[in-house]
Amino acid sequence: MIIKDRQEPIELKLLRILYTRMELTEKEKFRYLNLQKGFEGEVAFDRTAESILERYIINDLLLEVNNSYVQIDSLIISQDVIHLLDIKNYEGDCYLEGDKLYSVTTNREYKNPIIQLKRSATLLRQLLQTLKLNFLVEPSVIFINPEFTLYQAPMDQPIILPTQVQSFISSFNNTPSKLNDHHKKLSQTLLSLHQTKNPYTNPPEYNFDQIQKGIYCNSCYSYLVFRNNSSYLCKNCGEQESIRAAILRNIDEFELLFPEKRITTQSIYEWCNTDISRKTIMRVLKEHYTMNSKAKGTFYK
Ligand SMILES: [Zn+2]
């Protein structure tokens, strides 16, 4: 049973929009592609984990313990044990040497996820102790990408390699697990401690003037979209989107990028910067948002 769903991180959404609408630095692009890849790996794991029965699954949990943050990709509560999972979408050939993880082809050093995971497990155990919840914590790093190979993988480390993921998942259903109120209380307590504000996000600086306005293709992100009756047609990939959907998508982006700005016919008209009339924008706003009228004019929420 999934207690908490995985959502696409706000920072990833934000970076995707900014990537399409302004020039990012190499570091920001790297961050964007990393987040994207990581999220894809987590979603791939979720698809495999769907078959797990008789367990509580909490995805994407952020806890604060002793002034430190613990970021948990997936937490699976069984009768006798809590599985703390870190999902990595690494690709290519890597090897472990001492505490360090290197790429075979580039020799680049990666952050060793096992060290981070062990630290998270320690903090989670401390938290459970404080809460007087007596559960065993078993951490594992899941390397989800089938294109990943780890040479010299030590057998005594909590590593699940791509070829082992399926049997790791099956092992849950092969082990009977009865959940009771105690487990329910544990899952509810952890959920109540979830932090919504992630301290690790560091989005690029941007302002309204420097950002490219206009409607781009929802599929290939090209700005080569043209009006075709009541839809937009992408000249690059052929994707079609109704004008209404395109406007709503652009309002969503506007809200996410500029939460402090008011949604008005004029602001969305400027933001869409295309051949849609103010009248059309106003109609869409009236249908999908609540109109507020104040002395300073009409805006929508
Ligand atoms: Zn396209």
Image (cartoon, rainbow, N blue to C red):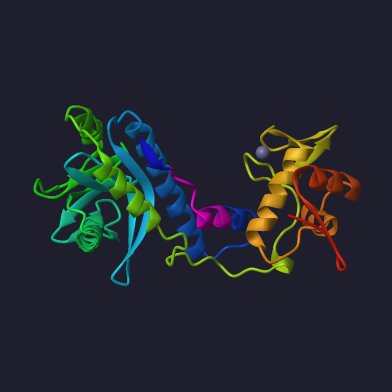
Horizontal placement of 147 versus 138: left or right? right
Image quadrant in which the C terminus is located: bottom right
Residue 275 shows in the view: no
Front residue of 88 and 66: 66
Left or right: 292, with 113 as reference point? right
- Residue at the spot 61% in from the left edge and 58% down from the top edge: 18
> Along the line of sight, which residue is nearer the eye, 28 or 71?
71
Question: On the picture, is 8 further left or further right than 55?
Answer: right
Q: Quadrant of ligand 1?
A: top right
Q: Which residue: 21% across, 54% down?
A: 133
Residue extending farthest to the bottom is 67
Q: Residue 49: which quarter of the image?
A: top left
Residue that appears at 63% across and 53% down: 20
Task: Answer whether residue 290 is magenta in the image.
Answer: no
Q: Is residue 12 magenta?
A: yes
Please tell me which residue lies in front, 25 or 129: 129
Bounds of the magenta segment: 5-15
Residue 162 at what x, y percent from top left?
26, 37
The quarter holding residue 169 reads top left
Q: How many marks?
A: 0
